[in-house]
Amino acid sequence: MDGVQDIGYGRIFAGFYDRIFPKDGYADLAAEKLAGLHPGGGLGTLELGVGTGRIAIPLSQRVGPVRGVDSSPEMLEELRRDLKEKDAPVTPVHGDIRTYEDDEQYGLVYCVCATLSMILDPDEQREAIRRAAARLAPGGTLVVETWNRSGVLEMFEGKDRTSYFIPYPEPNTGLLTYSHLIRDRMLWQASHIWFENGSSRVGTETARLTTPEEVEGFAVEAGLTPGQRVADWTDAPCTEKSPLFIAGYSREK
């Protein structure tokens, strides 16, 4: 479709993505933090890897129109279904963040929820950051939230395989994850089993683990200036043990 290469994430996860990553207060907090980084001035906002609109919808209600790019037709269909029920100025776009470009300049471009890690080639990650940076207006900000290599390795405790279970607030609901680390390529393969009311769904994903310094290097090469780096949307300090990091990079005015 449209010449867009899709890894198939949406075909696997679209049906229960919003259960694993709910559109809750933490998503609203992320939207609030991102809104605070928008320079205003009538500039638009671009999300790379919009998914089902978990962040784009509440963010658009704060800063105005958001263009959301995703390679998954299934995830975009979920987004469109949600937009029919909500008054939110979000425009879904079928595209590949590794090659995406348009004629607009944005005050805020963001790529969150470890979407960057779904790109398994470092050169393609670099290109995605370069293209994102090229979409920024002077004074604009690029925000990346992705896996922190050292924090993920900490979970493995020196082994190549591990598993963990995360209970959810609802009765008989939780997420069981089996993880495999491919150390020579720093790839993390995770198979998730979602349990809910006696039923289960299974999905597998692979991520390339980056360091904050590596992503910062991509951004600097693209002409951006590094800014704040935190561990999560509560602004907790980023340490070597943080599973994720969130970093901002700005284009000079």
Image (cartoon, helix red, strand yellow):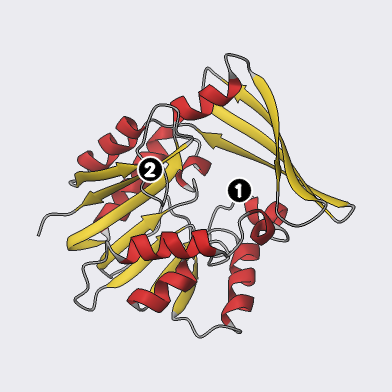
* Other residues around mark 2 within 10 Å, as few (<14) / some (14–19) / many (≥20): few
Residue 68 or residue 113, whichever sits in front: 113
In this rendering, position of residue 130 left or right of residue 123: left
The amino acid beneath tag 2 is Ala
Sequence-wise first label, 1 or 2: 1
Q: Residue at x 55, y 61 (%)?
A: 51
Confirm whether residue 50 shows in the render.
Answer: no
- In the picture, the quarter occupied by the N terminus is bottom right
Residue 172 or residue 192, whichever sits in front: 172
Say the numbered circle drawn on residue 58.
none
Q: Residue at x 45, y 25 (%)?
A: 150
The amino acid beneath tag 1 is Ile
Say if 185 sits above or below 3 in the image. Answer: above
Say if 221 sits above or below 134 in the image. Answer: above
Quadrant housing residue 2: bottom right
Confirm whether residue 48 shows in the render.
Answer: yes
Quadrant housing residue 127: top left
Q: Which residue is mark 1?
A: 7
Q: Mark 1 or 2, which is nearer the eye?
A: 2
Q: Which residue is mark 2?
A: 236
Say if 171 sits above or below 69 in the image. Answer: above
Residue 70 or residue 149, whichever sits in front: 149
Q: Residue at x 25, y 57 (%)?
A: 141
